[in-house]
Image (spheres, rainbow, N blue to C red):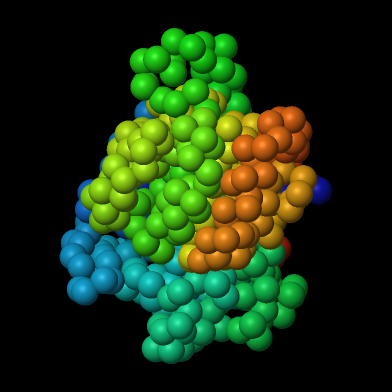
Amino acid sequence: MPLPGVRPMMRLVLLTELIAPYRIPVFNALAAHPEINLHVIFLAETDPGLRQWPVYKSEIQFSYEVLPSWRTRVGKYNVLLNKGVNAALKRARPDALVCGGYNYAASWKALRWSKRSGVPLLLWMESTAHDLRSCNSLLESVKARFVRECDGIIVPGRSSYDYALSFGISSNRIFTAPNAVDVNLFRRKTEFARQNRAELSRRLGLPAQYFLFVGRLVREKGVFDLFDAYASLPPNSCCQVGLVFVGEGAAKPELSRRAASIPGASVQFPGFIQRDDLPAYYALADTFVFPTHTDPWGLVVNEAMSSGLPVICSSSAGCCADLVRDGRNGRVVAPRDVSQLHGALVESISNQGINVLRGECSRDVISQFTPESCARGLAEAALGQGAVCHG
């Protein structure tokens, strides 16, 4: 029996796809919440076809299990099927269930199970109106049906909040859990890297100054827009400031071919960089550029800001409305607008003093987007359902 006046712990079960490195600190913080008894059900450990990161199991401080799964691709769509969803939920005996997505068979099984069991289900949804997938009418109708069946919606920021409202969801059913990375990890590692700038720059073979992009090298991330904006800089600027694309993807061969056509410029492709080595690339950069055409959020912007960088960000990034203060910690540019992106690059090159001030502003803004703040949002959403704890 709980003590009089003491709220019993809620058994919260979170169903999500992968053991993603950026989610582990959030789930650790959620497990440490005094009113939450957390259990996470992963649909798979990782996706070897798309994800090159290791699974940091040694960092996990919460109860979890990984369901048996089978994965394939049908055209451009990722299909993931799982066994044992209902059995896992029954064993976990949740008071509330958070489902990280609607686009898996397991998500629909969880929704049906929640209805049968009388357990409230909240959808953790990052989609925004800028998401190119929202142009697919069939997917939108499926999403709308799932969203409206849920007891609540958890969103990471303003763009996804507005998108949830567009489904007719009342504002009192929408909760915000701000998307986060391990701010302290990136801050600590970038500070160390800057103290060893000369040695690191020489070892990694990086330009003395450079614009940085981190992410998949695919057209929809705006990588060709960034390259074209950079290539149109005056020749002396290209010689002065390099461009570094961290990541892998289908666009890499074409970008490499085009890079060879800019005389005197330093355009580099170090490939995919693991989490613990990535802060060095942020630390030595001048400005982070994220010109995506479509992105539910863009956690690399969180990483760059945690590292004290000014950012140039497309307005299509889900994080933009929450993280980027135009003219204060960077610039907001329209997606696919190479001319506007070019202007932002020119501004960055021409005034290093502004870059320093904007980097400091980035650190101030991102201090509110920590794993703990995300965990608080998730906990408040679950507790707000007023579920009655078992036992």
For residue 104, what is the image quadrant? bottom left
Q: Position of residue 154 (x, y in %)?
A: 61, 64
Q: Position of residue 186 (x, y in %)?
A: 55, 29
Check the image and name the residue furthest to the right.
5
For residue 372, what is the image quadrant? top right
| Residue 218 visible from this viewpoint | yes
Residue drawn at x 64%, y 82% is 166
Q: Would you place residue 69 above or below residue 237 in this image?
A: below
Front residue (pair 101, 89)? 101
Left or right of 103 in this view: 374: right
Q: Would you place residue 208 above or below residue 75 in this image?
A: above
Number of numbered callouts drawn: 0
Quarter placement of the C terminus: bottom right
Q: Position of residue 306 (x, y in %)?
A: 61, 35
| Residue 56 visible from this viewpoint | no
Left or right of 96 in this view: 68: left
Residue drawn at x 37%, y 21% is 204
Residue drawn at x 64%, y 40% is 348
Residue drawn at x 40%, y 15% is 202
Q: Position of residue 269 (x, y in %)?
A: 33, 38
